[in-house]
Structures are given as C-alpha cells and as structure tokens.
Image (spheres, helix red, strand yellow):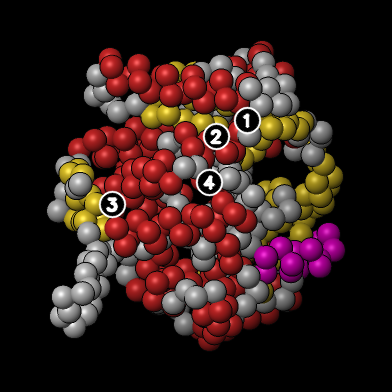
C-alpha cells in the first residue's frame, strides 16, 4: 500500500506489562524499553573447602509454573531500577516494598513470556537484528557505534539483544491476543463525536499521573478491603503534601510506578473508562478520590492539560501515479526498464490515465492512478519528495520507493482545513487504543492468575 497514514501517537499503555521495568540500556535509546533479562543465575562458583568460610549460593525466591526466579535475578532488577529512580530524582521506596513490587512484576512478566512460548509466539534472530539496526538508526549511529556505546555502559551486545527479543515477543503477544480483535465501528466514532459533553472537550489532552492498587480477579472481600485501605492511605499521604511520584513508587502496582507513574498525554477518548468522566471535571494539579475499576483502585492526578482545537490547515496535493513493483517476480532492472518504456510513451503523447489503467500495479489503477487529495506525510518520503518538486500538470521521471518504480503526476494543489477529518481519525484511533488497553489489562491479570506461583522462604 502506497499511502502511509498517520496514527495518533501512542502514550505509555495503561497497565501494559511490556513496560514492567526499564533497563539501564533503555536510557540510551530514549524510548520505553523492555524488562531486564530474567534468567536463572548459576550458583556462585564454590570456593576451596575451608572450615572457616561459608559459601553463599544463589537462592530461589519464587517459582512461576516450572521456572525459577532467583535472588540474583531480583538483585539485578533492583540495581537497574534504583539507577532509574536516582536519575529521575525520585526517592526509592523502602527496600522490602521495592522488592515486593519488583518480584510481583517479574512473576507477571514470566507468566506472559511462558504463555507466549506455549502458544507459538516466536521471534527469530533476523527480527531481533533488524530491531537492533533500527534502534541504532534512530539514534543516528551505525550498529558498530551503537555496540560501543553499549560496551561503555557495561551492557553486553548479547544481553541487549535478549532484551529486544523479549520486548518484541510481548508486543507480538499483545497484537495477537488483543489488538487484532479490536474493532471500532463508524457508529462508535459518530456516537463519540456527537455526544455534547465529549464534543466540548474532544480537543483537550491531559497529562496524567496514576496510582493503581490492583485487585486479583478472584479476590476475597477481605483482600478487596485490604487493597482499598492501601489506596486510601496513599491518598491521605498525597493530601498531606506527599510527593505523588514517590508515593506511587511505594504503593502503585501499575507498570509505570517506578518511572514516575505517568500515563503521558491522553485525549478524552483515550482516557480509561474508570476515570474518563472524572478527569474532564478536574483542573491542573487536582487529585481524584480513590476510584474503583475491575482492575483495582485508582488515584489520578492531572499534571497538565492543553487544547489541540486550533484549525489544522495543510497544503494538499491531488496526485496520480503509475507503479511497477519490484519483488520476487520482477527484478530491479526489469522494473526500471518497464517504467522507462511507460515514460517514453507518455513523452510521445499517451494519456497518463490510460497508461495507469493498463500498467500500474497499484489499487489506484482502476481510477487512472488517482490517489485523491494527499496530506503532508501521507506517503513515503521518496514519493513525497518527488511530488513536492513538481509543478501542477507536470509529470516526474522515474521515482524509486520501497514499493518499486513510479511515475508521478501532480493534478492540483490547495490549502485545506482538515480539522474535522483529523478529529475523526484521532477519535477512531483513541477509541481503538482505549479498548485495546482495557482488554490487555484483563488479559494480563488472567494470565497471571492462571500461573502457578510458589514463594520460597
């Protein structure tokens, strides 16, 4: 497909376990990272026998199904998180609280990774290497330069690759179990846009911080009450002047608790259902009451808000093209030769529309190659760059993109207010993301509850 439509930027996913714990390596790439590699550490090498010395061996602290979590694993996670908290200027919680939170997240992550393996989610070495190359490119580094940066930070190439493998695995698991099943209908978008309360605030975005005290799916009344009191205690500390991020680090079960507890910027449609209506009534700096949802008890703070309702006027281009694809059946040289022959016929007076209908290997061929009105960044960079250089009525020479060889013709240009279309696209994306977030939260909780977990003394 030629057009590359823009999606609404995705903030930190609400209760997504792919962000269970960001390793120190994630700071190099300036994006949410994957959990530190969790492998059972080998026992420490035995020292020569001596009656005056005791040799401390690594111990198992928990078993998830048939996989052990060792004290070494836990210590490794703690070290990475303490670095993050220090760099974020967040006071760490008490050691026993931090250990409880980390162990709980490691158990959840292990259960998800085991489920992925059992149900056939596979990430091969080629996929991992491509992801490594993309990360290097995003940081404007060659792969060799990026490996040297990792070495300076004390992170081995093999370790970082395994972190990437885990991140990709969890992403693919979410895509398969949740996102592929989420659908937003036109009626749902219409309903959202037509609701007066939502229409008045649909262009507002909120920067939220969040505390979650989770409640297991089959929790007893006593467990529910215990969790409620924990949330109420956290709220009382906040109301008494306590720092929200520090209290979240000590209290919250949310994946982002140890990274500042931020949910990021979200518009109205992307607010979790549990507190969407309440947030719309809050002002900057306000903290909610304790809120209940199927996931547990929540406390929400509005850190900031902004209005994105200004009209969006862009330069649109109505464009046609002819595409000859380069693939397994058409080589690079064959594709270029075919597009050159088409150019010769156009130069000799053939109509562009007729040549597109006969030759183009794009879905637009039936329309004479007409792509309609195209917004900036709708198409791949190579196509957009060639299109922008053409005058109205002008036809390009051969243009190479990842799809193959093109001839491009600009029909018209105009300035257009796309605010209405943008709102509709944003509403659809945000509603889809909200559904996916909530479904994945349920999926994570159910997967964790199904796992056999044994804690060791």
Residue carrying label 3: 110
Q: Which residues are magenta?
A: 381-395
Which is nearer the N-term, disc 3 or disc 2? 3
Q: CA distance from mark 3 to mark 2?
A: 26 Å
Residue 92 tag number: 4
Judged left or right of residue 128, residue 201 is right
Q: Position of residue 299 (x, y in %)?
A: 54, 25
Judged left or right of residue 436, residue 117 is left
Q: CA distance from mark 3 to mark 4?
A: 24 Å
Q: Quadrant of residue 228?
A: top left
Q: Quadrant of residue 320?
A: bottom right
Tell me: residue 304, above or below residue 118.
above
Judged left or right of residue 106, residue 98 is right
Q: Residue at 55% across / 82% down in the picture?
A: 148
Q: CA distance from mark 1 to mark 3?
A: 33 Å
Tell me: residue 139, above or below residue 171.
below
Q: Residue at 50% across / 75% down in the picture?
A: 154
Tell me: residue 323, above or below residue 31.
below
- Between 378 and 158, the one nearer to me in the picture: 158
Indicate yes or no whether the magenta region holds residue 267.
no
Q: Are marks 2 and 1 in contact (CB under 8 Å)?
A: yes
Which residue reaches farthest front? 52
Indicate yes or no whether the magenta region holds residue 394.
yes
Tell me: residue 321, above or below residue 454.
below
Which is nearer the N-term, disc 4 or disc 1? 4
Q: Are marks 4 and 2 in contact (CB under 8 Å)?
A: no
Residue count near mark 4 (Cα–Cα under 10 Å), binned few <14, some 14–19, many ≥20: many
Q: How many marks?
A: 4
Does dot 2 land on a helix, a strand or a loop?
A: helix
Residue carrying label 1: 242
Residue 247 tag number: 2
């Amino acid at each position: 497909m030629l057009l590359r439509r823009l999606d609404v930027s995705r903030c930190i996913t609400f209760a997504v376990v792919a962000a269970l714990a960001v390793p120190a390596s994630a700071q190099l790439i300036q994006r949410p990272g994957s959990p530190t590699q969790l492998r059972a550490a080998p026992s420490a090498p035995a020292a020569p026998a001596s009656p005056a010395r005791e040799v401390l061996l690594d111990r198992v602290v928990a078993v998830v199904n048939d996989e052990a979590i060792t004290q070494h694993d836990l210590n490794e996670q703690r070290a990475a998180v303490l670095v993050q908290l220090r760099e974020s200027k967040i006071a760490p919680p008490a050691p026993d609280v931090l250990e409880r939170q980390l162990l709980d997240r490691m158990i959840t992550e292990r259960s998800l990774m085991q489920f992925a393996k059992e149900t056939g989610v596979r990430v091969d070495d080629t996929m991992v290497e491509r992801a490594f190359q993309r990360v290097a490119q995003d940081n404007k580094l060659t792969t060799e330069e990026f490996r040297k940066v990792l070495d300076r930070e004390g992170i081995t190439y093999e370790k970082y690759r395994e972190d990437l493998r885990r991140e990709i695995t969890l992403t693919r698991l979410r895509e398969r179990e949740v996102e592929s099943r989420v659908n937003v209908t036109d009626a749902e978008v219409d309903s959202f846009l037509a609701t007066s309360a939502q229409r008045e605030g649909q262009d507002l975005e909120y920067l939220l911080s969040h505390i979650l005290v989770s409640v297991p799916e089959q929790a007893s009344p006593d467990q529910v009450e215990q969790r409620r009191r924990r949330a109420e205690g956290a709220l009382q500390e906040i109301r008494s002047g306590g720092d929200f991020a520090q209290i979240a680090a000590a209290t919250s079960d949310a994946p982002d608790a140890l990274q500042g507890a931020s949910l990021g910027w979200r518009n109205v449609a992307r607010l979790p259902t549990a507190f969407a209506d309440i947030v719309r009534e809050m002002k900057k700096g306000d903290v909610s009451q304790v809120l209940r949802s199927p996931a547990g008890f929540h406390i929400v703070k509005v850190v900031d808000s902004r209005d994105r309702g200004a009209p969006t006027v862009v330069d649109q281009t109505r464009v046609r093209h002819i595409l000859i694809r380069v693939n397994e059946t058409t080589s690079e040289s064959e594709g270029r030769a075919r597009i050159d022959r088409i150019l010769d016929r156009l130069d000799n007076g053939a109509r562009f529309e007729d040549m597109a209908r006969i030759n183009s290997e794009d879905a637009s061929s039936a329309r004479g190659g007409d792509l309609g009105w195209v917004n900036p960044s709708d198409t791949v960079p190579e196509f957009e760059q060639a299109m922008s250089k053409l005058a109205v009525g002008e036809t390009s020479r051969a243009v190479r993109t990842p799809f193959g060889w093109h001839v491009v013709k600009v029909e018209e240009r105009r300035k257009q207010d796309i605010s209405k279309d943008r709102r509709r696209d944003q509403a659809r994306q945000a509603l889809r993301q909200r559904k996916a977030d909530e479904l994945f939260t349920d999926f994570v909780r159910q997967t964790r509850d199904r796992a056999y977990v044994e804690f060791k003394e």
